[in-house]
Amino acid sequence: MDIKIVLTVGLSVLLSANQFDEALEEELSWLKEETYVISASRVKEDIDKTASSISVIDEEMIEKIGANNILELLEIVTGLEVTQSNIFIEELGIRGVKDFTSKQILFMVDGHSLDGNLLNGGATSNFSEMSLDNIKRIEIIKGPASALYGGNAFTGLINIITKDAEDIDGVELKLKGGSYGYRETNILFGEKFGDLSVVGNLNFKAFDGEKDLVQKDILGRSGETDPYHQSIKADLKMDYQNFYLQSIFTKRKDGSYYGVNGAMVDDTKTKFDYLALEFGYKKAFSERLNILTRFYTDILSFDNDRGIYPEGYQPQVDINTMIAMNPALAQQMGGVPQIPIFANGMNVINRLTNQKDGAEALFTYRPLENYTIVFGGTYEKHKQYDVESYQDFNPETPIPTPLPSMRDYTGTEFSFAPEVSREMWAGYINNIYDVTDSLRVTVGGRYDDYSDFGSNFAPRGGVSWQINREHILKFMYGEGFRTPTFAEYYNRHIAITGNQNLQPEYVSTYETSLHSKFNKLETTLALFQNDFRDLISQEGTIYRNIGEAETKGVEVEAKYNLNRGSYIMANYTYQLATDKLNNTSLPDVATHKGNIFFNQRVSQNINIFTHIFLKGETERADGDSREPLSGYALLNLSLNAKDIFLKNLQFQLSLRNIFDKDAYSPSYFLKTPEDDYRRDGRNLFLEVKYRF
């Protein structure tokens, strides 16, 4: 019998007989650590037997690490990398591949997709500001999950699993403040009223951010960034017998950071509202058959008031060369004009609404004790409407000229987006077969059909073999696809043009891993290779399938458990990301990345968590002559104290980047060595939490 089970049973007997030692009770809680996941196969299964490369961040880690948002948590996972962009969107990459809006990753909450941005794809702007207090665990699949979840689960999937009413059992209030004007209030409620279970979470967050002095922007000017943020988030989850209701609401406003075009501008505002509603019915008809049906809608509206260039901007245009290349321009422009000066700068206002409506039926059937089938079907309709487009410059002239006020370009070829729609239906199946108690085989696939660009099939397969009590070996294969966004497929803007001949992006992934347990030491070694084709990027002003890439690497994790909740843990990622067409390294990808953690449980009431984040040198984009971006190491510390002055009262003091090290994300527009995108310097946060 497993030593962990023996210890758990033994401790349970001691506790029921004596009930005297709270430290022992906490030890029991640690021994009963959950080892299941639900995202890998859409059914609860042992993490050691899944046919996916999956990592879990549990509630204990979330509580101890002292992060301010989910992206700070995800950065500690092997194979994941977070970088800042020139505007408010942070970019998340998995195993060497990332893009501007992280649209190659499927973000979910309790199985509900948050990818409501149909124009550009991705969900980090909504996902990143979710309250950490309502999270029970985060499951991260590294590698394609399209065989179960369809498009957007291309390089990976991240599923937040929120707390149930019994996990909260009352009201929890949190107040948090810190550097750069950071302030946060969170109210979490969970209660059961007979058959009715209710969980609600309300979060307010705002900060001014650390302003960065840019020595030379794209125009050669200096200026300060404007990284302020304000958000309100409200979540509700209700269960009554076999029915449930889930809702997510986010309202967010951000500053300009480094400018949409790399120029320092004033008073730029990016705002969006997001609402997700899901109603479902789940029932176990027998020990062998379960069914889930759900209906959902997601509505995302954004209102961007952006400065493109600052006051006094004058385009850098060589008129004489333009006319020499095209003599008809002089007649068209009535002679050789003066280069205009934009006294009020160049500004745009863009608004639209994306809506996704869908329904799904999911069945779990176990015809044999050792055989489970997961299958189902999905229908969705996507639409983009209420598009408004305004700008204070005339794009119809060979050289843009200033206008006295904002002009409405909605519905014209100069509008930033069209009003469009598409439909999708899909069917999927996943077979889980335990050949023996130690050998599991998983095979499945999904077929998707889109009304505008056609159909796709994504297969998956995996073998999990428990060699002995100490070692578990896995072999996995999967394919994934990413559907073109509305912007990539339909845009008719003169500067960024869609292409209705686009096909989805494709990836094939091969992976093997070995998980080992040696008394107090656990290790995992994973080797992976991803082959990408038909990657979508701009060629001139038009989107085309012109990219091919390969990423391969090694991920290593180790954890050594000390006494009663203390431990040492480390992970390391080595990845090579290659542009196969140019035979060059993919830009903005660190070859080496790692974390070292030391958790010291001082007593049953006090815990100290130390974290060292390591990132190696990062290659520049092709054509960027600057030296590779230097690596760095950051030291973070978090002190937790609970039930010291008052029962149910908890304090947390977090120090991040203690030594105030310079750390940067690679810039796209700024080309001087000192003007990459700076990460926050030394910062401090104090959190007080009380449960009623």
Image (cartoon, rainbow, N blue to C red):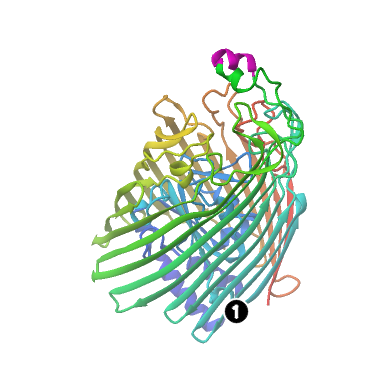
- Rendered residue at 60%/19% (across/down): 331
- Rendered residue at 55%/57% (across/down): 300
Which residue is more in the foreground, 420 or 32?
A: 420
- Quadrant for the C terminus, please: bottom right
- Magenta stretch bounds: 318-327
Looking at the picture, how far across and down is residue 214, in whole percent?
A: 73, 33
Dominant secondary-structure state across the stretch colored magenta: helix
Looking at the picture, how far across and down is residue 662, in whole percent?
A: 69, 36
- Quadrant for the N terminus, please: bottom left
Q: Secondary structure at mark 1?
A: loop
Residue 619 quadrant: top right
Which residue is more in the foreground, 546 or 515?
A: 546
Q: Eyeballing the image, is 632 above or below 511?
A: above
> Which residue type carries mark 1?
Phe
Relative side of 650 to 435, left or right: right
- Rendered residue at 26%/70% (across/down): 366
Which residue is more in the foreground, 565 or 20?
A: 565
Res 1 seen here: no
Residue under label 1, please give it. Answer: 20
